[in-house]
Amino acid sequence: MAPPKCVLLNAKRLNFDGALDFGRLEAAADVRSFELSPDDESILANVAGAEVVVTKELVLTGAVIARFPDSVKLVIEAGTGYNNVDRFALSKKNIQLRTCPAYSTAAVATLVLTHILNFSTSMYAQQARVAGGDRAHFEDLDRNVGALPLFEIAGRTLGLIGGNGCIGSHVARLALAHGMRVLVSSRSGAAPDGCEAAALEKLLRESDFVSVHCPLNDATRHLLDAEKLAMMRPTAYLINTARGAIVDERALVAALRGKRLAGAGLDVQDPEPPLRDSPLWDVAVLTPHVGWRRRETRQRLVDLVAANVAAYAAGEPANVVSPPLPTPP
């Protein structure tokens, strides 16, 4: 049987440095295009004749999916989430959706820990001073360093929103290894070994750090709004490596400006990148969604995409997003 014809859309998002090896994917499929496809018409032009469509953080609307050729049988989101894809539209056209879970677990978890360690030493604030030419904190420790938060993380409380998934559980293990208390709020009401299950409100009120790990959907969009952020301690820090829209960014900016939160580290924003005039640039620590971008992490993702294609060709149900959604009325 001939390998399926596959098109990889938005490929530069994955291979921006040209360092990745696509050998396994090319062995599993007839990969005929690695084009960047930023709009509907170029998406449709690239998927013509393809059986498998691989995307990376590219929005596939219901309108464009409705125009997919009948040849398309499978869409693979090269990532863990699938909020960029209209699942109802795929279901209506009988197109299967698969994802690549757990490829970035360690990378994202260590980024969360990086934020915790940096906030606990005021590292960001100290380096910002040096970058701005201010070296006074090297000369007058009592006055200039003493005014910045400096504390050990052992005994501090980390709250994980959605902490039962792969990444959240890995963050929990890292935090426990550093002597932290870990609270977990999840839909299941369970918590990983060594952690405490908690209602979201309790988690927000008791945590020194709050880290977001839930998926983005209708129930979690702006989950952390002004009311929820007001429950957090003024000495607490918010870390978001999940999806930007889970946090109401206007409310977050107001909380940070009003000193009702100590700080925020955001690897994800809404939109990405933030608008040039967004106040987030001035009040939060921002990174351009780098949690998954380490070379080893991206190579693992490409290899998982290849494994997904091979499983599909063999009729195996690996990483299928389920249960199937009913077609909306």
Image: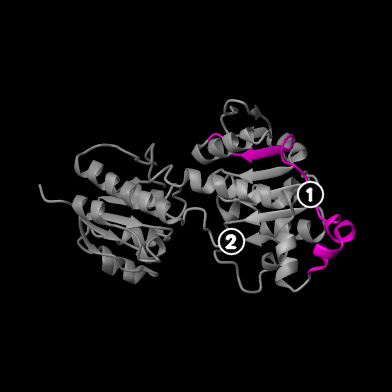
121 or 290, nearer to the observer: 121
- Specify the farthest residue to the left: 1
Q: Is residue 92 something one can see in this rendering? A: no
Residue depicted at 83% across the width and 57% down the height: 145
Residue 85 occupies which quadrant of the picture?
Answer: bottom left
User: According to the image, label 1 marks what residue?
Assistant: 150
Give the Cα separation between the discs numbered 2 and 1.
Answer: 23 Å
Q: Position of residue 19 (x, y in %)?
A: 35, 62
Residue segment shown in magenta: 135-164
Dot 1 amino acid type: Leu
- Give whichever of discs 2 and 1 has the lower sequence position: 1
Residue 56 occupies which quadrant of the picture?
Answer: bottom left
Residue depicted at 19% across the width and 40% down the height: 314
15 to 110, vertically: above or below:
below
Residue 219 occupies which quadrant of the picture?
Answer: top right
User: According to the image, label 2 marks what residue?
Assistant: 287
Residue depicted at 64% across the width and 51% down the height: 115
Density class for disc 1 (Cα within 10 Å; few <14, some 14-19, many ≥20) is some
